[in-house]
Image (spheres, rainbow, N blue to C red):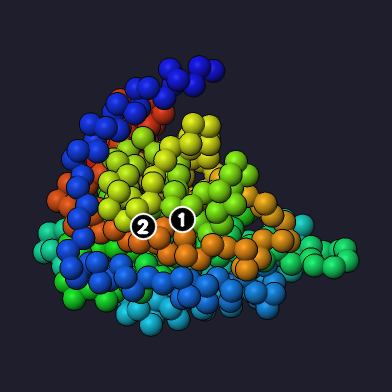
Amino acid sequence: MKKAALLAAPIILATVAFSQWKPAANPAQKAALNEISAPSLRGHVSFLASDALEGRGTPSRGLDVAAEYIAAQFRRAGLEPVGDDGYFQTTEFAPRNSAEGAKKVRNVIGVLRGSDPKLKDTYVLVTAHYDHLGVKPTGEGDRIYNGANDNASGTASVMEVASALSKLKQRPKRSIVFMTFWGEERGLRGSRYYGANPVFPIEKTVANVNLEQVGRTDDAEGPRVAAVSMTGQDYSDVGAIFEAAGKVVGVAVQKHPQFSDAFFNRSDNQALADLGVPAHTICTAFEFPDYHAVGDHWEKLDYANLEKVNRLVALGILTIADSAKAPDWNAGNTKASPYRKAWSDRRKG
């Protein structure tokens, strides 16, 4: 594969799209972004990734406790509950080779309603998966897959951004949906379930920004400070929006030449993208020490950097939520063609 030839066209297209989006936080929005703090994020991650939650396997007692904790934070932020059971969208899941039968697996969903009479019934989704791998059945020593970076970091970020944006006196024009999924480690099960049973119309869902592995800066290729990557970054306008937002808050949004496209279908954004929604995952490190290992502990995260990443996410989301123009798929990128077609077919339908 000739990498230079592969990357040249998308970079030009992204530059064209970039000029259409100019994020600029007003004083009230800056104040909201400043509510995001490293100590708060540390508190969330250290609880979700504690031994007490036993690795948040799907299904498990630890996963249920995590769901309750997330719902409590949504409640604290004043988000509107929109599930079939308060903040919970419930269903059953039966693991393979389990004699116990099906188990109150739950997506956790809250919404910050928009303020514009026309745009408030359109939705921007901020998501992350809150499950992990549970506990090793046998062995000595540490057997708990705590999953601090994967993905207590993303879950904590959803809660932190929700809390910050809920403090805005002037709500964004579009509604912002904050959601955490069960069962990503089981094959995107929670996000697939939401896609098949959406709480908000897919036709009215303008974008999905999914957060995964955003807490550790010790990337396998070298330190990743004040920089993130986005999967399928030049597949849609969302990449250009976040590149522009990154310039404002001092976080570079970079397309990884190997992993950005290859990892597009490796997280929960895929479930929404398959339905035509411009959906991407933001991460700090694609590959990091302790990935899917018992050593992924909360003490190893860079919380000062995570604070910066959260401010990037908040400003990028606000840019989409306050814009009359919705993001679109990149017509010039053939990799985005299936998703663009899905969106077009859905609108026709």
Label disc, if present, on residue 67 of the rendered structure: none
Q: Residue furthest left?
A: 117
Q: Is residue 118 left or right of residue 74?
A: left
Where on the picture, by quarter, is residue 345? top left
Along the viewing direction, whichever of 260 and 202 lies nearer the viewer: 260
State the separation of the CA atoms marked 1 and 2: 9 Å
Along the viewing direction, whichever of 67 and 242 lies nearer the viewer: 242
Residue at 77% from the left image edge and 57% from the top image edge: 97
Residue 155 screen position, x and y as percent: 49, 65
Q: Is residue 340 visible?
A: yes
Residue 254 screen position, x and y as percent: 42, 40
Quadrant where the C terminus sits is top left
Residue 192 screen position, x and y as percent: 49, 52
**Mark 1–mark 2 contact, CB under 8 Å?**
yes
Residue at 63% from the left image edge and 49% from the top image edge: 288
Residue 12 screen position, x and y as percent: 29, 26
Q: Is residue 173 left or right of residue 14?
A: left
10 Å crowding of disc 1: few (<14), some (14-19), many (20+):
many
Where on the picture, by quarter, is residue 178? bottom left
Q: Determine whether the residue tagged by mark 2 lies in a helix, strand or loop.
A: helix
| Residue at which label 2 appears | 313
Q: Is residue 25 left or right of residue 149?
A: left
Q: Amino acid at mark 1?
A: Leu
Q: Is residue 201 visible?
A: no
Where 225 sits versus 28, above or below? above
Q: Amino acid at mark 2?
A: Val
The residue mark sitting in front, 1 or 2, is: 2
| Residue at which label 1 appears | 211
Quadrant where the N terminus sits is top right
